[in-house]
């Protein structure tokens, strides 16, 4: 009973003071914590998803900007399809201990910036997952929930339905223009569903973004073992453009949109070329990209976790006047695809530029400039990057199922592909 009340207290604290919408997302809350990563073990570019009852593990890592070990703990919470807390108690979704101490850490080596790297894997010898669905890991210092450092989200899937996805330029609003239409077919021949309209929740994401995600999409046609999602306006996405790149895995050689790297007594500074707008083109920038992901790396060193240095990355976007109807944000995993003060560009009236400086760990980062209209939570690429139906994007489909008497959303299938 005490554990039940403790979890309720923690959820209330997080929802009221940190996550006011009561929706969890991967995010850093402690200003001394950097480079939070969540991915399947040995697969840093994959979605943070593992199979239930498999040997797969989720790897969670972060840096704390002190050169000595601190005490960090974690606590695991089960979530619904919308990443709100589910109704399950700990013993219903965890076999073992749902909290623990993060005791795997290492001090940085051969870096100007000193930090301590922490990492841990889920599940571990202390517990296993009993059910599928979404999960959040609360990371906090000194076993004190008032010292919340970060939240890391991931999913556990059962793969009981088969998912087929197609992307076409023939949308409900135009043909071969700025948009892409997603069409989905679910094969649930091994997983009977009584009422697909009530029991299924289908979420579709483009490049892991939350702002333009299609949430809880309903089927257009339904049959006993086949559900079809077609000609659905909720599944129309801007094509956007190929992501920009900044690769500063070396202090001496660099690529992408980097102009120069300069070192002072304390830090390296990476200066990007002033960004050119990419609207009005006949087609997107040629070539593939990482669709917003980043990969840590420091050339000639073996372990990027502790050998990669931190550098100030300077973003510059020229503009004669600031936009009156919205703001510009840096979009990508480097900002967790979140629109906040950390990702928002400021306007310099004297130099007529938008600018931002981020303190990032060495590696290769893909990103874009997103325009967020005032009074909206959905951004558009059309102001800065342009939008083109030919653009290659990564789409992921999450299929959740809750029976009529169910108390949680099972994750019945996940599909991810580039189109």
Image: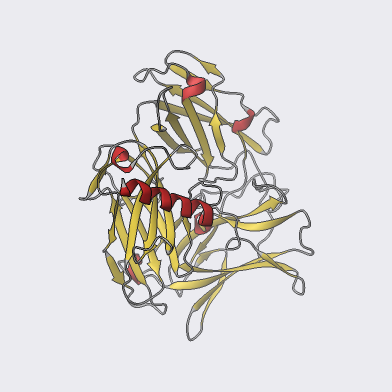
For this orientation, the residue located farthest to the left is 125
Q: Is residue 293 visible?
A: no
The correct choice, above or below, for 144 with respect to 372 in the image is below
Q: How is the image coloured?
A: secondary structure
Q: Is residue 149 visible?
A: yes
Q: Quadrant of residue 274?
A: bottom right
Please give the name of the residue rendered at 32% of the width and 43% of the height, measured from the top-left corner: 90
Q: Quadrant of residue 276?
A: bottom right
The correct choice, above or below, for 31 with respect to 138 in the image is below
Percent x, y of residue 296:
40, 62
The correct choice, above or below, for 364 with respect to 390 in the image is below
Please give the name of the residue rendered at 67% of the width and 27% of the height, measured from the top-left corner: 172
20 left or right of 171 in image: left
For this orientation, the residue located farthest to the bottom is 265
The answer to which of 84 and 232 lies nearer the viewer is 84
For this orientation, the residue located farthest to the top is 224
Count the labels in the image.
0
The answer to which of 317 and 76 lies nearer the viewer is 76
The answer to which of 48 and 8 lies nearer the viewer is 8
Percent x, y of residue 196:
48, 20
Percent x, y of residue 69:
31, 72
Percent x, y of residue 37:
40, 57
Please give the name of the residue rendered at 48% of the width and 48% of the height, measured from the top-left corner: 24
Please give the name of the residue rendered at 22% of the width and 50% of the height, measured from the top-left corner: 126
* Figure quadrant of the N terminus: top left
The correct choice, above or below, for 35 with respect to 2 in the image is below
313 left or right of 351 in image: left
């Amino acid at each position: 009973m005490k554990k039940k009340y403790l979890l309720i207290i923690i959820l209330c604290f997080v929802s009221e003071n940190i996550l006011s919408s009561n929706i969890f997302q991967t995010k850093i809350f402690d200003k001394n914590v950097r480079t939070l990563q969540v991915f399947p073990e040995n697969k840093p570019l994959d979605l943070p998803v593992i199979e239930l009852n498999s040997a797969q593990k989720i790897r969670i890592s972060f840096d704390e900007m002190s050169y000595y070990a601190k005490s960090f703990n974690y606590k695991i919470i089960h979530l619904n399809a919308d990443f709100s807390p589910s109704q399950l108690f700990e013993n219903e979704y965890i076999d073992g201990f749902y909290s623990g101490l993060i005791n795997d850490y290492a001090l940085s080596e051969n870096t100007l910036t000193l930090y301590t790297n922490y990492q841990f894997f889920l599940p571990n010898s202390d517990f296993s997952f009993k059910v599928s669905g979404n999960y959040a890991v609360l990371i906090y210092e000194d076993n004190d929930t008032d010292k919340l450092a970060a939240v890391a989200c991931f999913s556990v899937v059962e793969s009981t339905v088969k998912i087929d996805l197609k992307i076409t330029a023939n949308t409900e609003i135009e043909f071969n223009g700025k948009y892409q239409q997603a069409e989905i077919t679910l094969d649930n021949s091994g997983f009977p569903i009584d009422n697909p309209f009530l029991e299924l929740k289908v979420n579709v994401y483009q490049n892991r973004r939350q702002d333009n995600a299609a949430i809880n999409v309903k089927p257009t046609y339904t049959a006993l073992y086949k559900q079809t999602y077609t000609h659905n306006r909720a599944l129309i996405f801007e094509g956007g453009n190929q992501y920009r790149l900044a690769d500063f895995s070396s202090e001496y050689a660099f690529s992408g949109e980097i102009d120069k790297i300069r070192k002072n007594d304390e830090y390296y500074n990476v200066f990007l070329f002033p960004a050119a707008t990419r609207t009005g083109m006949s087609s997107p920038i040629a070539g593939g990209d990482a669709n917003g992901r980043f990969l840590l790396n420091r050339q000639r060193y073996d372990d990027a976790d502790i050998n990669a240095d931190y550098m100030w990355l300077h973003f510059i976007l020229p503009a004669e006047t600031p936009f009156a109807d919205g703001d510009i944000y840096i979009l990508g995993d480097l900002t967790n695809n979140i629109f906040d003060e950390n990702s928002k560009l400021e306007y310099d009236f004297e130099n007529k530029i938008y600018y931002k400086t981020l303190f990032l760990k060495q590696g290769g980062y893909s990103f874009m400039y997103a325009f967020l209209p005032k009074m909206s939570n959905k951004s558009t690429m059309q102001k800065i990057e342009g939008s083109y139906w030919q653009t290659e994007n990564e789409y992921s489909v999450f299929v959740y199922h809750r029976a009529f008497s169910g108390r949680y959303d099972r994750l019945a299938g996940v599909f991810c592909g580039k189109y």
